[in-house]
Amino acid sequence: MVAPPDGTNVLHLCEGDLEPDNTGILLLPDDFDKTVQELKKTGVQFTGEPKKEPWGTYAMIKDPDGNEFWLMPKE
């Protein structure tokens, strides 16, 4: 992954085939839960509810063209 020094946005560089529509772009809000609730209130499309995995918590959102972006808590 690559990011600017402030680490607010991250590009996940992958080799091989990506999942369809997955941009590999990761957004790191200061308050993950609050951001998820605010985005839901404004009608942002989520691909599912936030998930907790052994490697971290995340949610996936879609833009109007169907491109997916990752949201993860800022650590």
Image: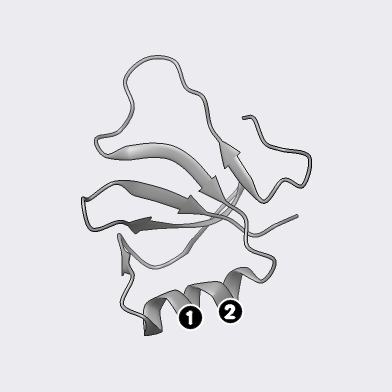
> Residue placed at 53% from the left, 32% from the top?
12
The answer to whether 22 is drawn above or below residue 62 in the figure is: above
Residue type at tag 2? Lys
Q: Is residue 7 left or right of residue 38?
A: right
| Outermost left residue | 65
Q: Label 2: state its secondary structure.
A: helix
Which residue bears the numbered disc 2?
34
Screen quadrant of the N terminus: top right
Residue 50 point in image, percent of width and height: 46, 65
For label 2, the crowd category at 10 Å Cα-Cα, with few meaning under 14, some 14 to 19 and many 20 or more, is few
The image quarter in which residue 10 lies: top right
Q: Position of residue 53 (x, y in %)?
A: 54, 52
- Seen from the viewer's position, the closer of residues 18 and 3 is 3
Question: Does residue 62 sit above or below 20 in this rendering?
Answer: below
Q: In the displayed structure, would residue 28 be above or below residue 25?
A: below
Name which residue type carries label 1: Gln
Horizontal and vertical percent position of residue 55: 62, 45
Asked if the residue under mark 1 is in contact with the one under mark 2, i.e. CB atoms within 8 Å, the reply is yes
Q: Give the Cα distance between marks 2 and 1.
A: 5 Å
Q: Label 1's element?
A: helix
Left or right of 49 on screen, residue 12: right
Residue at 53% over, 46% down: 26
Q: Which mark is residue 37?
A: 1
Query: Which residue, as the protein is rendered here, is positioned at the far bottom?
Result: 41
Q: In what quadrant of the picture does the C terminus appear?
A: bottom right
User: Is residue 49 or residue 24 the one in the foreground?
Assistant: 24
